[in-house]
Image: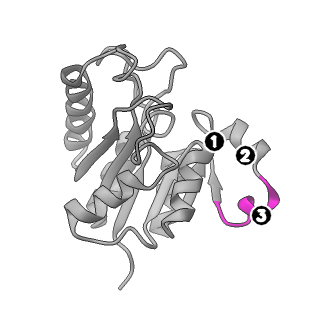
Amino acid sequence: MPQTLVILDRDGVINHDSDRYIKSVEEWEPIPGSIHAIARLSQAGYKVVVATNQSGLARGYFDEITLANIHSYMCSLVENASGNINAIFYCPHGPDEGCSCRKPLPGMLNQIEDELNLSVENAFFIGDTEKDIDVALAKHCLPVLVRTGKGAAVEKQLSQEKKARVVIVDDLASAVDFILT
């Protein structure tokens, strides 16, 4: 049976990223086409899960309530487009905290498997960083790099060996076109 799970990074894939972090609902701005793309996946029967590093929590830029409000807003936009995000997983730790959940480590994907009781193997993993590609490959997911966010710069730096193992598309809408055809 084909895999029906799609894992999405958040910043740079669903919404515009910022080097200053997304610290409020007002700063969270969807990339054009991304909300409808998620709805299309959902309508096609895919489980859609978000896996996102959120070190702004550890850095004190925002709190858990603010992050929950941002995610609630994102989910409501998807629901208004007749779609659904099945779950959101995030790493709240800073890069030097030594956790196992911060991408490129597989902790969040292990959490997805445990909490949703399904394997991430062969799931599409759509991201805009090399960390996203690395965790996808480590867990035998199918990595898709979008050129939004940091993706265009990452594409230029990828080794030929990694490029051969990654689907590279312009944005989340293009990634969904690829998945659904």
- As helix, strand or loop, the secondary structure at mark 3 comes to helix
Q: Amino acid at mark 3?
A: Glu
Q: State left or right for residue 122 relative to residue 36.
A: right
Alpha-carbon span between mark 1 and mark 2: 7 Å
* Residue beneath disc 1: 147
Q: Nearer the viewer, mark 3 or mark 1?
A: 3
| Mark before the other along the chain sequence, 3 or 1 | 1
Residue 108 location, x and y as percent? 36, 51
Q: Which mark is residue 42?
A: none
Q: Amino acid at mark 1?
A: Arg
| Mark before the other along the chain sequence, 2 or 3 | 2
3, above or below 65, in the image: below
Does residue 142 appear in this view? no
Hey, which residue is sitting farthest bottom in the picture? 1
* Residue beneath disc 3: 161
- As helix, strand or loop, the secondary structure at mark 1 comes to loop
Q: Nearer the viewer, mark 2 or mark 3?
A: 3
- Label 3 neighbour load within 10 Å: few <14, some 14-19, many 20+: few
Q: State left or right for residue 9 relative to residue 157.
A: left
CB under 8 Å between discs 1 and 2? yes
Q: How many marks?
A: 3
